[in-house]
Each structure stands twice: as structure tokens, then as C-alpha cells.
Image (cartoon, grey):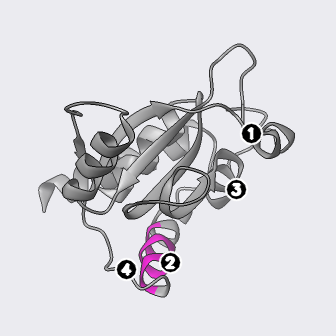
Amino acid sequence: MASAQRDLAMLATVVRQAGGEIAQVAHVLDWFHQRLIADGQQPARMLYVYRTNRPVDSTAAASGDNPRPGLRPRLLLAFLSADSAVSFAQRTGLARSPRLLTLSPARALAVFLQQPSLSALHIAYDDLPAPDGLPVGWRLSRAEVLAMFAIDSRVV
């Protein structure tokens, strides 16, 4: 349980440093779990993450998801299971033996906020790719995550 407390404190610190509303942290994490439940998934205690660079599509570019010119936009791809993460990486050729990080949702959001080159957080429900090549799941843009914590996107 101490790890969960540390991750929560880390997220609160990151939100505060970015000028956001610390009071939103608990609300955002609850919404995160409720969103998984609404999509027929179990609430995630842990996410399995590896990073991959993906080209920015015109929609992302138009919405301003690349927060800093000159930085190559990246997608943080988080899976609900380690097996799905490894299977997807091997099947798509992203990595022969990917190194996965195990992150709580709070830590994943903190990492996402700390990395301005990350343009989106994609929560993958399994390893089956959708037509866009990403696994089925839901995608949160940088703008959406900043708005959830009431962080001014011009500051971060």
C-alpha cells in the first residue's frame, strides 16, 4: 500500500508543479477507474507500459497535441496486462523482447505529465490492433489530460 501512497503523492506533486488543481487528483483517478468499468474492463491497479514513437496524424497536429515544437511527439501505450503488451509488441515488430514497466495509473499519469513530448496516453484493452494499428482501447490526448487537472497548456 505504501507504493500506492507514493504514486499518489508523486502525481499530486507533478500536478502542483504544473500549476494544476491538486483537488482534481482523486477525481481524475476515480474517473479513470470508472471509464474502464464503463468499457467493460476491470479497474487497473497496474498498467504495463513501453514507449513507441508514432507519426503525428493530421488530427493530432491540428489539435495542438505536439506541445513543444522541435520535440518528436510520442505516444505512451499502456496495457491492462503484461501478456497483451508483450504479444502486441512481438506481433507488430515494435520490439523483439520489450522491456515493460509496471506503473500504477497515478504514476502513469505523472510520467505522462512530466514528459512534454508525449502527445497522448493510449490505454490498450488487449493486443488486437484496430484499423489505426493501435490496440483496441481509449486514447487521452495531452490537452485532455491537462484539462482534467486544470493545467494551463501554455505553461506546460
Q: Nearer the viewer, mark 1 or mark 3?
A: 1
Residue wearing tag 3: 147
- Find the distance from the CA under tag 2 to the CA under tag 3: 17 Å
Local secondary structure at mark 4 = loop
Residue 138, above or below 35? above
Residue wearing tag 4: 41
> Which mark identifies residue 120?
none
For the residues labelled 2 and 3, say whether their Cβ atoms are less than 8 Å apart.
no
Local secondary structure at mark 3 = helix
Residue wearing tag 2: 35
Q: Does any portion of residue 23 appear in the rendered image?
A: no
Give the residue displayed 52% in from the left and 67% down from the top.
Answer: 28
State which quarter of the image contains the N terminus: bottom left
Counting residues from the start of the chain, the first of labels 4 and 2 encountered is 2
Label 2 amino acid? Arg
Residue wearing tag 1: 57
Label 4 amino acid? Gln
Q: Nearer the viewer, mark 3 or mark 4?
A: 4
Q: Is residue 4 magenta?
A: no
- Find the distance from the CA under tag 1 to the CA under tag 4: 28 Å
Q: Is residue 101 left or right of residue 39?
A: left
Q: Residues within 10 Å of mark 1 (few under 14, many from 20)?
A: few
Give the residue displayed 51% in from the left and 52% down from the top.
Answer: 134
Q: Nearer the viewer, mark 2 or mark 3?
A: 2
Q: Nearer the viewer, mark 2 or mark 1?
A: 1
Counting residues from the start of the chain, the first of labels 2 and 3 encountered is 2
Counting residues from the start of the chain, the first of labels 1 and 4 encountered is 4
For the residues labelled 4 and 2, say whether their Cβ atoms are less than 8 Å apart.
no
Local secondary structure at mark 2 = helix
Magenta region: which residues? Answer: 29-37
